[in-house]
């Protein structure tokens, strides 16, 4: 069964809902422009399924699952990948175990078979486990002197506490040494299942061939997962401020607070107004106030972060130690101004124009389109979302944007500052002007 969606854009016009003979579902775009096939898939679970006392298990599985499987040891497995120029990688987010596969059309059978072996018969040999464990621990040790990593970790701890989202995805120096091979196998047994599988494929392959490969690759997974329930949580309420002393030339500031979930009716308004505030472009308010007007930082941005059970906005900047207090004040002031007054009509119009154009330009390769189609599935959006997105952006009114601004920024910030100790940097955050929280 395929369901073809008609749409004005090249990408959206070809999206099919494919169901394999064995019942594996995928969003599929057949494109013979170049002889490549790209697949992205996600399985619900992610780092939130790590044992509470052993954060980093899912991350370690992702690093090890392609280190030998089936009848191939680690070296031979990677030689097969290299010989055929097959790109295979795995990762974990808070909510999902992710995989990415990219290959030449002629090598698709071998590529999908190597993925099948990784998912269904990983070795987890002790020599490979210890090698990967050492690499992870080396990275974690480097992070202890990395101000950005310290700020990010502390920020999540402040925001989420002992909730699974508050635990580091990559684990800790205390937890990673205690992760056993049995822990890795148990994670695979509980998490990697067909019921929570989402797949997106783009490239030079026909529907019948793809259906066959999906059955061969994923058909051997268990039908049902055994996930530990993860409760919904709202990030800690601002204002709060933490300071971590570290003798580095540049002070790092991470700031944020509770966000708006992806399924919230006000989400797109929040997305648009956040672009105006600090969406990473040279036209954002934070960039103008902090970089251009005051010369306090090289870059400053913030973005919306949404998960299955929570949502946040998170921003970051870096500045000289002696100007950290001034930088935090400037960020606070601009965010408070946006919460109280909202954007102008001109800012709204320009942001909507940019977001409509840039999204389509960002889908210019098979891998990027596959990634987008997977994300839309993980976000529970409809298959014709690409077609509908510009109209949803256009529908955001000035009142919608102002309401979203009050919800996001009307209560101040959670702020984590990492750098040389300064009296100005260590002062508690001032209570922002009162603002009504929109529902």
Image (cartoon, rainbow, N blue to C red):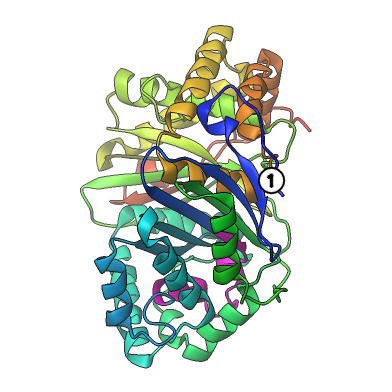
* Quarter-of-image position of residue 21: bottom right
Give left or right: position of 115 versus 165: left
Is 49 colored magenta in this rendering?
yes
Residue drawn 40% across the image and 87% down it: 71
Q: How many marks?
A: 1
Seen from this angle, which residue lies furthest left?
Answer: 249
Residue drawn 58% across the image and 51% down it: 207
- Magenta-highlighted residues: 42-64
Residue 33 image position (x, y, % from top left)? 39, 37
Q: Is any part of residue 414 visible from this angle?
A: no
Q: Nearer the viewer, residue 208 or 272?
A: 208
Circle 1 residue = 2
Q: Nearer the viewer, residue 120 or 152?
A: 120
Residue 89 sits above or below residue 362 on the image: below
Give left or right: position of 75 versus 16: left
Q: Is any part of residue 72 visible from this angle?
A: yes
Give left or right: position of 276 versus 307: left
Q: Secondary structure at mark 1?
A: loop
Residue drawn 31% across the image and 25% down it: 291
Is 88 colored magenta in this rendering?
no
Residue 161 image position (x, y, % from top left)? 60, 62
Residue 439 sits above or below residue 345 on the image: below
Label 1: how many Cα within 10 Å (few below 14, some 14–19, many 20+): some
Residue 261 image position (x, y, % from top left)? 68, 42
* Quarter-of-image position of residue 48: bottom right
The C terminus - image quarter = top right
Residue 280 image position (x, y, % from top left)? 41, 31
């Amino acid at each position: 069964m395929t369901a073809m969606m008609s749409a004005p854009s090249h990408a959206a016009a070809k999206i099919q809902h494919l169901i394999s003979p064995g019942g594996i579902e995928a969003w599929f775009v057949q494109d013979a422009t170049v002889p490549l096939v790209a697949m992205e898939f996600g399985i619900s679970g992610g780092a939130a399924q790590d044992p509470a006392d052993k954060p980093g298990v899912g991350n370690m599985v992702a690093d090890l699952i392609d280190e030998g499987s089936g009848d191939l040891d680690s070296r031979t497995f990677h030689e097969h990948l290299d010989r055929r120029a097959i790109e295979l990688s795995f990762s974990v987010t808070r909510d999902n175990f992710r995989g990415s596969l990219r290959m030449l059309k002629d090598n698709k059978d071998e590529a999908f078979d190597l993925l099948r072996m990784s998912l269904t018969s990983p070795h987890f040999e002790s020599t490979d486990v210890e090698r990967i464990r050492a690499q992870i621990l080396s990275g974690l040790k480097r992070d202890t002197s990395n101000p950005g990593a310290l700020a990010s970790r502390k920020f999540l701890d402040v925001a989420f506490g002992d909730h699974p989202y508050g635990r580091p995805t990559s684990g800790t120096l205390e937890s990673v040494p205690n992760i056993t091979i049995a822990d890795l196998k148990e994670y695979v047994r509980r998490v990697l299942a067909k019921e929570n599988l989402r797949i997106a494929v783009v490239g030079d392959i026909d529907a019948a061939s793809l259906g066959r490969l999906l059955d061969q690759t994923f058909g051997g997974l268990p039908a049902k997962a055994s996930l530990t329930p993860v409760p919904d949580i709202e990030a800690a309420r601002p204002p709060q401020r933490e300071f971590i002393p570290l003798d580095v030339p540049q002070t790092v500031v991470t700031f944020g607070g509770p966000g708006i979930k992806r399924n919230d009716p006000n989400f797109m308004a929040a997305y648009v107004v956040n672009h105006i505030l600090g969406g990473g472009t040279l036209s954002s308010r934070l960039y103008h106030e902090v970089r251009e007007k005051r010369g306090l930082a090289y870059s400053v941005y913030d973005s919306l972060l949404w998960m299955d059970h929570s949502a946040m906005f998170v921003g970051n900047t870096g500045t000289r130690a002696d100007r950290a207090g001034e930088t935090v004040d400037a960020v606070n002031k601009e965010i408070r101004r946006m919460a109280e007054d909202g954007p102008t009509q001109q800012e709204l119009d320009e942001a909507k124009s940019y977001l409509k154009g840039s999204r389509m330009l960002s889908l210019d390769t098979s891998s990027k389109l596959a990634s987008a189609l997977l994300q839309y599935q993980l976000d529970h959006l409809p298959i014709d979302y690409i077609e509908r997105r510009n109209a949803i952006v256009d529908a955001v009114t000035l009142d919608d944007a102002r309401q979203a601004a009050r919800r996001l920024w009307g209560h101040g910030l959670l702020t984590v500052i990492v750098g040389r100790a300064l009296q100005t940097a260590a002062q508690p955050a001032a209570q922002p002007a009162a603002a009504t929280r929109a529902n």
